Amino acid sequence: MSDREKQQKYNRENNISGSMYARVNVGQNADKNKLDSAKMSHTGGSMNNKDERVIDNNSLTYTVLYYVIGFLVSFVIGFILFRLFHNYFYNEGINELLPSLLLISISLISGFLSSRLVLKKMK
């Protein structure tokens, strides 16, 4: 008798369903293949473990703080970079456009990255 036949015999004798859904949700009447049941059951886990917590990044407070901190830090970084490299911004044409675009993009990217880090540390 092969291993597969032994497994099938064991499953028949012990009323074990072969579906993946039933194997994952053992003990929740999943072996009847009722995927559309309205009754939700607790699958385990607790909120005491730090790695099981889900951070709610969709709350209004989080969003407002993200944008306020992001724009403030972007403004500060942009102001500092403008003061450091002010001679580059008084040229004409493309020579003025490139440093300006670099200043704006670098300050916005670094501002919102630091905002994300600050909010992650606050949680």
Image: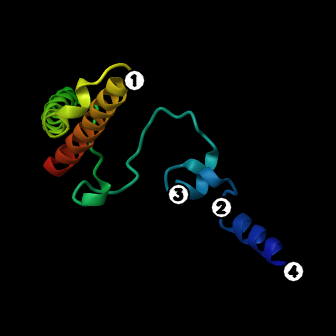
Mark 4 and mark 1: Cα distance apart in space: 79 Å
N-term-proximal mark, 1 vs 3: 3
Q: Which residue does the numbered mark 4 point to in the structure image?
A: 1
> In the picture provided, is 50 more to the left or to the right than 43?
left
Element at label 2: loop
Q: Which residue does the numbered mark 3 point to in the structure image?
A: 26
N-term-proximal mark, 4 vs 2: 4
Mark 2 and mark 1: Cα distance apart in space: 72 Å
N-term-proximal mark, 2 vs 1: 2
> In the picture provided, is 15 more to the left or to the right than 57?
right
Instruction: Look at 67% across and 53% down and name the residue there.
Output: 19
> Which amino acid type is marked by label 4?
Met
Sort mark 2 into few (<14), some (14-19) or many (20+) by Cα contacts within 10 Å: some
Residue closest to the far bottom? 1
Q: Is residue 33 visible?
A: yes
Q: Is residue 56 visible?
A: no
Q: Position of residue 103 (x, y in %)?
A: 27, 33
Mark 1 and mark 3: Cα distance apart in space: 66 Å
Task: Place residue 71 in its image quadrant.
Answer: top left
Q: Is residue 57 above or below residue 122?
A: above
Q: Which residue does the numbered mark 1 point to in the structure image?
A: 94
Instruction: Look at 22% across and 38% down and name the residue there.
Output: 111
Q: Which residue does the numbered mark 2 point to in the structure image?
A: 16
N-term-proximal mark, 2 vs 3: 2
* Tag 4 near tag 1, CB within 8 Å: no
Sort mark 4 into few (<14), some (14-19) or many (20+) by Cα contacts within 10 Å: few
> Which amino acid type is marked by label 2?
Ile
N-term-proximal mark, 3 vs 4: 4
Q: Nearer the viewer, mark 1 or mark 3?
A: 1
